[in-house]
Image (cartoon, rainbow, N blue to C red):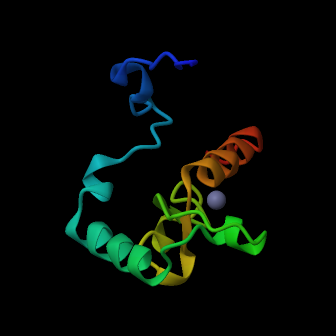
Amino acid sequence: MIYRKLRPVARLRKAPPSGPSERFDPAFYNSWAWRTLSASKRRADPLCEVCLRCGIHSPTECVDHKIPRAVDRSLELAESNLQSLCWSCHGRKTRAEQQKGIT
Ligand SMILES: [Zn+2]
């Protein structure tokens, strides 16, 4: 029998980026308005919207801004600007944005 060696939990956690181009904004993401809105979005769309277009059923793991907050902060609480994603799709979208210099 083959056992996969488990990585320590600490290595799985990613520290939020810091510095002038900080993406993680605790004041916003911990706000009542965001938590309520994102919870509502998760309930409405419990499956990753990108995976679903390919016929894959992946549970929603995060709520993403289609147009990033760095681009248009006025849309940060606009329901129409939100999409339910799995971490894999969210990571792909974020990398694409970083390559384009958006975030
Ligand atoms: Zn996905």
Q: Is residue 27 left or right of residue 73?
A: left
Can you give x and y, in whole percent of width and height, for residue 34 in the image? 32, 68
Residue 18 in view, yes or no? no
- Name the quadrant containing residue 24: top left
Q: Where's ligand 1: which quadrant?
A: bottom right
Please name whichever residue, 84 or 30, is drawn nearer the observer in this view of the structure.
Answer: 84
Q: Residue at x 63, y 68 (%)?
A: 57
Can you give x and y, in whole percent of width and height, for residue 11 in the image? 42, 20
Q: Residue at x 59, y 67 (%)?
A: 48
Where the C terminus falls, by quadrant?
Answer: top right
Q: Is residue 87 left or right of residue 15?
A: right
Relative to 81, say whether 35 is above or below: above
List the single residue furthest toward the left. Answer: 32
Q: Is residue 44 left or right of residue 26?
A: right
Can you give x and y, in whole percent of width and height, for residue 55 in the image? 75, 72
List the single residue furthest toward the front. Answer: 1
Can you give x and y, in whole percent of width and height, for residue 3 in the image? 52, 19
Relative to 31, say whether 9 is above or below: above
Relative to 24, say whether 41 is above or below: below
Q: Is residue 99 left or right of residue 7?
A: right
Residue 45 in view, yes or no? yes
Please name whichever residue, 53 or 55, is drawn nearer the observer in this view of the structure.
Answer: 55
Q: Residue at x 50, y 36 (%)?
A: 21
Where the N terminus falls, by quadrant?
Answer: top right
